[in-house]
Amino acid sequence: MAPHHTCACIHLNRLRFNYREIIKKIAPARLIPVVKADAYGHGAVPVSRCLVDEGADFLAVAQYQEAMELRESGIQIPILIFGRIMPDELPEAIRSGFRITLFGEEDIDWIEKTSGSQQAVVHVNFETGMGRVGVMPNRGPQFLDRLTRSRRCVWEGMYSHFATADETDKTYAEQQLSRFTALMSQLDGKGQLPPVVHMANSGAVLDMPKSYFNACRCGIMLYGHYPSKETSRSIPLKQVMNLQTVVAHTRRLPAGHNVSYGCRWKTDRETTIAVLPVGYADGVRRHLTGHFQVSIAGKRYPVVGTVTMDQIMVDVGDDSVAVGETVLIWGELENDRIQVLDVAEAMGSIPYELTCGVSKRVPRVVVDE
């Protein structure tokens, strides 16, 4: 156990395993690891350094500030920023060599108005059905004419994003893919196809090989989680994060005794309650109340009563559980495994929300075996 009562142990050996398995699946396409949101809660800097050591030559984040954190940590490979770069951020983004996503013609105008002569390397997100961001098809010809005439923009890549690639029914995803490939054909016919083309996310990497093109973007799978229970398991994965704590206190309660806020649970027999020093302020969501179990010494025990800000309670029955004993909330510890996907679905959520939701109060302990 790490020298912290509650911690998120980040196992870099498992990250390497996942990276290698994904590379094996998508070859010869390159992998663009997505390390936004602090690498989905795992720690963007140590995760990115590990991936660069493994051979990653491109990274992707959501925000300018996330890209700057990586540059300032010494990571020099290209970094694609999915979100919009505002005019006040553009000069430094261009100097830092970030790959800038264009949202429309105004982005080109902003780039051309920035001082200096250095060119901006850009990617274009095309709308194919996500309905969030991306150049609309009816604006495509006018936008691309503007882009190809720009002396300040170097058009390196194009991409789009699937809305339903992690669902069993791939009908809508196939429609998106068809729109994207039709656009690619048009651009190729005009000699305008950029060198980097990417659309596949984790769900598509698992189940839609026609979407690989020459690059794929993976986020959640790198960290050891399938995006949903509806995808295949065509790539073996290991969970990178162990969220774990210790038993802080045990108490014997009689039958009929209420536990936690709201008196929503009471003992139906005399039993031992183990108190764990972790709660929703750490990322164990209150919505998990009544819906999950933890593991102590390889045995599962139900969390009972309302999840509180700093503590949760576990019914261990008549078992002997010692103060200081390690408790696995999710992850892989020795021969035990609690899947984040299972915990997430118990509360009607997804793995992304749980790993990203582990708060800064929980120290990340990097383990490299």
Image: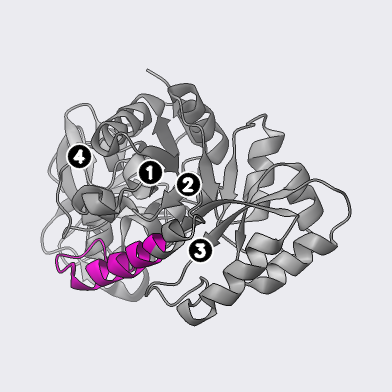
Residue at the location (68% across, 37% down)? 71
Sequence-first tag of 4 and 3: 3
Find out whether the residues at labels 1 and 3 contact each other: C-beta distance under 8 Å.
no
Residue 32 seen: yes
What kind of element bears circle 4? Answer: loop
Which of disc 2 and disc 1 is earlier in sequence? 2
Q: Position of residue 184 (x, y in %)?
A: 40, 60
Q: In the rendered structure, which disc, 4 or 1, sits on the residue that comes first in sequence?
A: 1
Q: In what element is the residue under mark 2? A: strand
Q: Nearer the viewer, residue 265 or 109?
A: 109
- Label 1 or label 3, whichever comes before in sequence order: 3
**How far apart, in angstroms, are the residues tagged by discs 2 and 3?**
12 Å
Left or right side of 46 for 148: right
Name which residue lies at 33% across and 70% down.
179
Residue wearing tag 2: 196
Q: Select label 4 or label 2 by which is in front.
A: 2
Q: Is disc 2 surrounded by few (<14), some (14 to 19) or many (20+) residues within 10 Å?
A: some
Label 1 packing within 10 angstroms: few (<14), some (14-19), many (20+): some
Q: Give the foreground label among 1 and 3.
A: 1
Residue 235: mark in rendering = 4
Select label 4 or label 3 by which is in front: 3
Could you say which is closer to the camera, residue 335 or residue 220?
220
Instruction: Quote the CA–CA distance across marks 4 and 1.
Output: 19 Å
Residue 359 image offset from top left, x and y in percent: 51, 51
The quarter of the rendered structure image containing the N terminus is: top left
**Relative to residue 291, is residue 319 depicted above or below?**
above
SS type, badge 1 = loop
Q: Assess whether residue 300 is covered by the magenta stretch.
A: no
Residue 310 visible here = no
Q: How many marks?
A: 4
